[in-house]
Amino acid sequence: MPSIFTGTSKSQRTIRHLSLSGLFVLSSASVSAAADADLENRFPQCIEHLESQAIEAGVSSQTAGEVLAGAEYLERVIELDRRQPEFTTTFADYLNRRVNSDRVSRGRELLDQHEALLERVTRKTGVPAPYLVAFWGLETNFGSYFGKMSVPSSLATLACDERRSQFFTEQLIAALRIIDEGAIPAEQMEGSWAGAMGHVQFMPTVFLRHAVDGDGDGKRDLWNSLPDAMMSAGHFLQDLGWDGDYRWGREVLLSQGFDYSMADGRRLPLEKWRTLGVTDAFGNKLANEPIEAALVVPAGHRGPAFLAYKNFNVIMGWNRSEFYAIAVGHLADRIAGAGKLQNPPPEDMPALSRNNILTLQKALNEQGFDTGKPDGILGPNTRSAIRGYQSENGLVADGYPGDTVLNALGVDLTSETSGSDT
C-alpha cells in the first residue's frame, strides 16, 4: 500500500503525523467525555435499579430508598477511577514516604498511649500491637484522614459505571446493610473515593465480614471508636491466618555471588537459606526455626533483601502489594524499637512509566521471554521473563529492570511516548 506521505518532506510528514495523533487524542477524549456525560444522564435510572437490587438482597426498603434518594453522581470519583499513574514508584520512594522518622515517632507515642487497648486486641487475636499501629499509620496516618467522599454517592457512581459495576454494586449493597444495622448514619459515612472507610479503611464487604464491636456498645463503628477499629483490624488479620508465633519477615544479607534467581517466590525452610549463605541483616546465622520463607528483593540486587514468612502473605491479603507488605512490616519493627534498614534501597533507580514497561514487555516477548500480554504492569510474569533474559545474558538474575536490561532492550527513559501504540 502506498504511503499517504508519498512526496512530502520529512517536516511535512512530522506535522501530518502530529496532526493525526492530535485528532486521535481529541477523538478519544471526546468519546470519553461523551461516555461520562451519558453516565451522568443515566444515573437516576441506574439508582432506581440499584434500589431494587438492594431490597432484593435484604436491605430494608426504607434505608435503600432514603439513602439512594440522596446519592449524588460524583464526577470526581470517575476521574479518579480513570486516572492511571504515569510512572510506577520506585521502592525507595514508596518506603521512604511511608516509613519515616515522624511516622515512627508518632507510632511509638500511640503504642504507649493505647497500650491497654492494644494488649487486649493482641490477647484476643494474636496480632502484636506494633503491627496494629503500623496498619493504622499506613491506612489513615493514625486516624488523621479518613477521606471526605460520601461513601454511598461514591459507590453508587462507580456501580453505575460499566467498568467495574458488579464489584461496586456489591460494595454499595454492603454499605447500605451497614447503615441498616445502625453502625453509622448515611450522612456520616465518609471515606475514600473508592469506598474504603474508617480508621483502617475497610471496604464495605470487609466491614460486614470482619468488623467487630470492640467497646461493647452494640455497634461496629470504625470511624468514631478506636477500640472497634483496632479489634476489627486484629480480627481481620486473624481471619486471614495471622501466625502469632512469628514475625512478618526480616531483612537479610546474601552471600557474594548469590543466585538471585532464587528470589522467584519459592518458599524454603530457614535451614536451607542458611546453607545458601543467607544471614540476618547483621551477619548472624538465621534462627534454627521450623519455618519456611521466600526471598524478596524489591529493588533488585543493589537494594535490601528480605526473607518473608507466612505473615507477609497475610499482610498481602489486606493489600496485594509487596511494597505495602514490606512497609507494614518494617514500620511495625521500627515502632517496636528497631532501627533503619542496614541496606537502604538505592534512590537513583529510575521510575518507569507504563509505556516504558510496555516497551520492555514487547521486547522480551520478541526475544522469547514470555511476559504474557503486555499490560504496562511490572508483575510476576514480567519479572520471571527478565530473570530469564538476565540468566541467558550473564547478568545478575534478580528480575529487576536495571539500566543494563533497559538499555539492551531499547527502553528509552527519556521518551514520553515509549511503547505507545499511537
Image (tube, rainbow, N blue to C red):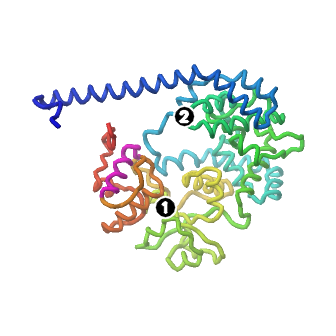
The C terminus: image quadrant: top left
Which residue in the protein does label 1 denote?
297
Q: Residue furthest bottom?
A: 275
The N terminus: image quadrant: top left
For the magenta stretch, what is the residue range?
351-366
Q: Quadrant of residue 154?
A: top right
Residue 185 placement (x, y as % from top left) = 79, 29
How many numbered tags mark residues here?
A: 2
Q: Secondary structure at mark 1?
A: loop
Nearest the viewer among 207 and 29 is 29
Nearest the viewer among 340 and 76 is 76
- What numbered label is drawn on residue 81? 2
Query: Please, is residue 20 above or below residue 168 in the view?
Result: above
**Residue occupying image coordinates x 26% and y 28%:** 18
In space, the residues marked 2 and 1 are separated at their CA atoms by 30 Å
**Residue occupying image coordinates x 79% and y 37%:** 58
Give amino acid for label 1: Val
Upstream in sequence: badge 2 or badge 1 = 2
**Residue occupying image coordinates x 68% and y 28%:** 49
